[in-house]
Image (cartoon, grey):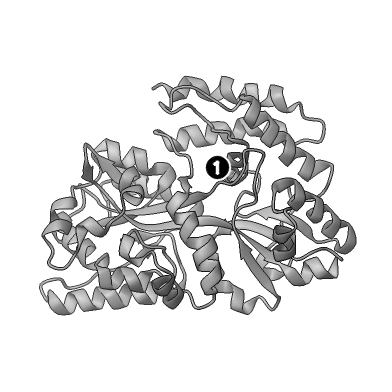
């Protein structure tokens, strides 16, 4: 199975599950997990498939889901899951499986539905003379304008960053959906054929981000990085799975939902699926292993890093046991509502070409004197010919 994690604890759990499967199926001699660099993961995987070296199973990012689900690259799995004793297929939530179905049949298993949240460094906020995250929320200032105001003050007082959209780095533009959704903006229409980057909502959202980066200095500008988990920023937007590194951070922290935007409260989730490659050498066995890997028992084990698709496991009790670093209140008030109401990060068919085209066109925005509206019109001019194909 190709994966993008190199986390040794996660890989050890995968190996443990695989060893249990092999014990029950001695005809299977080995199961290996091959970490691929996240930055080039989808490109590397598609190159493997095109070169006749497809893995038996593969993790699939949500922004490439449409390409894999619609292309026939994945073998059917629903029959194998439903026929596995004790699998409880009906426990998989409709919202978690929606992206991974074709013609009403599940094509890939959504092994992680992880909400985007906001982590706050309360020690850094106090050092800058600013209210803590909880105090901001209690004062009704848990919104993007409030975060930018406080972030600018932190930067002025300490030299450290205000807020960071983790993994954006002025290249992974789709991570900015965690911000622009607060303005009600979308990159394209529901049918995927029309560009919406030049909408008034998107213009306002990018105007906010541009001002944060170049005027208020509440967000690191291009070429500048800040790692929240190393104590270098007051806030970061990222997925809940990052919480596992917080015990080693050495500062007081808090976890809150994404700040409100002009359109009010909202939430976003990132998803990852596991698919059986149709061109793999062992597709039937791979489907059977996937049923084992994603069984109720193993799903509960994996929940410490990968929020489950199983409705019965979206409980404070289950998630608290799997995520001891989070409080019951954080799970109940942030994690579960984020999973239940989150909109999946945007994706599109031909994701690699569309993504690269948007990224290149957005470069025009990231200069101090940029014309935001004209730049976003330029994004639509560049990408719209690709959207209707």
- Is 50 left or right of 4, judged from the image as shown? left
> Considering depth in this image, is 378 or 218 the residue closer to the camera?
218
Question: Is residue 204 at all visible to an observer of this figure?
Answer: yes
Numbered label tally = 1
Q: Residue at x 44, y 43 (%)?
A: 63
Q: Residue at x 43, y 35 (%)?
A: 348
Q: Residue 271 location in percent, x, y?
A: 42, 52
Q: Residue 198 location in percent, x, y?
A: 62, 24
Q: Counting other residues with Cα less than 10 Å from the Cα at mark 1, is it few (<14), some (14-19), or many (20 or more)?
A: some
> Considering depth in this image, is 37 or 9 the residue closer to the camera?
9
The secondary structure type at the circle numbered 1 is helix
- Is 100 left or right of 127, judged from the image as shown? left
In which quarter of the view is residue 210 placed? top right
> Considering depth in this image, is 328 or 268 the residue closer to the camera?
328
Q: Residue at x 77, y 35 (%)?
A: 367
In which quarter of the view is residue 325 placed? bottom right
Q: Residue 104 location in percent, x, y?
A: 21, 40
Q: Residue 98 location in percent, x, y?
A: 32, 44
> Considering depth in this image, is 167 or 342 the residue closer to the camera?
342
Quadrant into which the N terminus falls: bottom left
Which residue corresponds to mark 1?
A: 174
- Is 331 left or right of 169, judged from the image as shown? left
Q: Is residue 23 above or below residue 98?
A: below
Question: Is residue 37 at all visible to an observer of this figure?
Answer: no
Quadrant into which the C terminus falls: top left
Q: Residue furthest right?
A: 157
Q: Residue at x 39, y 69 (%)?
A: 303
């Amino acid at each position: 199975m190709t994966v993008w994690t190199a986390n040794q604890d996660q890989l050890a759990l995968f190996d443990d599950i695989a060893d249990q499967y092999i014990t029950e199926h001695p005809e299977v001699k080995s199961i290996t997990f091959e970490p691929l660099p996240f930055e080039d993961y989808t490109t590397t995987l598609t190159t493997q498939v095109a070169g006749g070296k497809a893995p038996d199973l593969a993790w699939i990012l949500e922004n490439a889901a449409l390409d894999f689900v619609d292309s026939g690259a994945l073998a059917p799995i629903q029959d194998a899951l439903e026929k596995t004793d004790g699998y409880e297929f009906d426990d998989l939530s409709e919202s978690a499986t929606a992206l991974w179905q074709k013609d009403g049949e599940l094509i890939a298993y959504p092994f992680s539905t992880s909400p985007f949240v906001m982590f706050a460094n309360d020690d850094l906020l106090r050092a800058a003379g600013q209210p803590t995250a909880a105090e901001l929320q209690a004062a009704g200032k848990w919104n993007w304008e409030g975060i930018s105001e406080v972030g600018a003050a932190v930067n002025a007082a300490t030299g450290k960053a205000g807020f960071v959209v983790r993994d954006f780095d002025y290249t992974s533009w789709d991570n900015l959906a965690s911000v622009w959704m607060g303005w009600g903006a979308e990159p394209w229409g529901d049918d995927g054929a029309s560009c919406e980057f030049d909408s008034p909502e998107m213009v306002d959202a990018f105007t906010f981000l541009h001002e944060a980066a170049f005027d208020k200095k509440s967000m690191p500008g291009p070429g500048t990085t800040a790692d929240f988990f190393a104590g270098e920023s007051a806030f970061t937007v990222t997925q809940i799975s990052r919480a596992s590194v917080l015990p080693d951070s050495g500062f007081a922290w808090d976890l809150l939902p994404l700040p409100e935007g002009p359109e009010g409260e909202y939430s976003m989730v990132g998803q990852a699926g596991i698919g059986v490659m149709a061109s793999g050498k062992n597709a039937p066995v791979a489907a059977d292993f996937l049923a084992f890997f994603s069984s109720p028992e193993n799903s509960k084990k994996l929940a410490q890093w990968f929020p489950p698709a199983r409705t019965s496991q979206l409980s404070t009790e289950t998630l608290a046991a799997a995520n001891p670093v989070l409080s019951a209140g954080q799970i109940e008030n942030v994690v579960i509502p984020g999973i239940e109401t989150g909109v999946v990060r945007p994706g599109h068919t031909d994701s690699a070409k569309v993504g690269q085209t948007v990224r290149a066109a957005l470069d025009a925005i990231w200069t101090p004197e940029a014309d935001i509206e004209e730049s976003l019109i330029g994004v639509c001019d560049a990408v719209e010919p690709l959207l209707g194909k």
